[in-house]
Every structure is written in C-alpha cells, then in structure tokens.
C-alpha cells in the first residue's frame, strides 16, 4: 500500500514538473511581429523574445529610400503580436515660423498673426507664451519629439508616448485617435485639436 502511495506522489511531482517546464518554455519562446510600411520586405517575422525594433527592421530587409524613421524608437522591445509600421516621408516638409516670417510682420518689424481680427501687440504685455500663439497645426504622424513638444500641453513624456504609439500601431487616421495614447483624455484633446493634424 505504501509503495502505491509513493508511486502516486512521484507521478504527481512529475506532472507538476512537466507543466512548469512547458510554461517556462512558452514564456521564453520566439515572438511574431508584423513589420509593415516602408521596409524592403513587409511581412510577419519570427524573432527571439526580447528583440528590439531595429532587429525587426533588419530582418525585413532594412528601410526603403522613402522611409521616414526619424521618430522610431529603434531600441524599443517588441512583444508577441506587435505591429511595427514605418511611414513614408511627406512630399512637403513641416512649415516653421520662419516660412511665414515675411507675411507675419507688422510695420515695427514684430511678428504678428493676421489670421484673426484682433491680436495682441506682443506676448510680454499679455503673458501669452509662444506655445499659446496661433501656428500651423502640426502633423502628429510625422513630427519628431522636439516638434511635438511645441504643442501646448505636450511635454517630453507625452511626446514619447505619441511616438511609441505610432511605432506600434501605425499612423493616426483621424485627430481623435490621439485620445488612444495613454494619459490623453477628452479634456486634453479639446486643448490639442486646434493645433494638430494627421495629414
């Protein structure tokens, strides 16, 4: 009787050990990532767990000449089921304040925006900061971290979250999609929507 009990105990121990081994093997196994956009060979690739964005790009044959990878976090760790999207460069670069300097000058040589009927003569007298002034909406699909931070209410942390979201999910299809980024809620979106665009 005692022999039977010992045999049953050993069978139970062996069963638990086998289960633990299978779970451990699964956690350490390869992952699959969908690499799309401007890479030489877009496809689903199998990589070692813990692989980074740069390794997935290399496995897909590298970037094309039209790739705009300036905002990609190539050191980001990939996870099973991730989608890595590399967008195309825009035909026209983002406009900067220097592009419209001639059209936004008053008789005193100070920059002034005539897109509205009334504008303050200077930011010093009103307390308005440069990020509060009216500028061309920024393309949130192509802007780098530094450009994103020129938008009111977007700091370094939020800019990084926007870039990380684009890297994994592809470009924003509409402005409202920015609310899918962590920590950007309805109130923040209301402050942002006049200053952003998606194309």
Image (cartoon, rainbow, N blue to C red):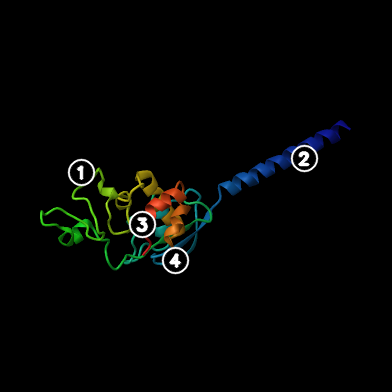
What residue is disc 3 on?
A: 194
What residue is disc 1 on?
A: 125
What residue is disc 2 on?
A: 11
Q: In the rendered structure, which disc, 1 or 3, sits on the residue that comes first in sequence? A: 1
Residue positioned 18% across, 59% down in the render: 104
Nearer the camera: disc 2 or disc 4: 4
Residue positioned 27% across, 51% down in the render: 133
Question: Left of 123 or right of it: where is 34?
Answer: right
SS at badge 2: helix
User: Is the Cβ of the residue at disc 4 closer than 8 Å to that at disc 1?
Assistant: no
User: Is the Cβ of the residue at disc 2 closer than 8 Å to that at disc 4?
Assistant: no
Nearer the camera: disc 2 or disc 3: 3
Question: Left of 118 or right of it: where is 142?
Answer: right
x then y, percent, for residue 64: 34, 66
When asked about the image quadrant of residue 155, the answer is: top left
Above/below status of 10 relative to 148: above
Nearer the camera: disc 3 or disc 4: 3
What residue is disc 4 on?
A: 42
x then y, percent, for residue 83: 48, 58
Nearer the camera: disc 2 or disc 1: 1
């Amino acid at each position: 009787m005692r022999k039977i009990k010992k045999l049953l105990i050993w069978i139970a121990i062996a069963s638990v050990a086998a289960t633990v081994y299978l779970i451990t093997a699964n956690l350490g196994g390869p992952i699959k990532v969908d690499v799309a956009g401007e890479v030489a060979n877009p496809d689903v690739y199998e990589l070692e767990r813990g692989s980074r964005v740069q390794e997935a790009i290399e496995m897909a044959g590298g970037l094309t000449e039209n790739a705009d990878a300036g905002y990609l976090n190539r050191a980001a760790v990939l996870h099973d089921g991730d989608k890595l999207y590399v967008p195309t460069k825009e035909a026209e670069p983002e406009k900067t304040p220097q592009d419209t300097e001639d059209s936004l000058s008053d008789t005193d040589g100070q920059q002034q925006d005539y897109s509205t009927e009334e504008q303050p003569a200077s930011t010093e007298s009103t307390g308005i900061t440069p990020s509060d002034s009216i500028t061309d909406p920024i393309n949130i699909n192509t802007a780098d971290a530094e450009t994103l931070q020129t938008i009111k209410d977007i700091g370094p942390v939020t800019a990084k979250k926007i870039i990380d979201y684009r890297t994994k999910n592809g470009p924003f299809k509409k402005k409202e999609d920015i609310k899918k980024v962590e920590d950007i809620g309805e109130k923040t979106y209301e402050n942002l929507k006049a200053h952003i665009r998606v194309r």
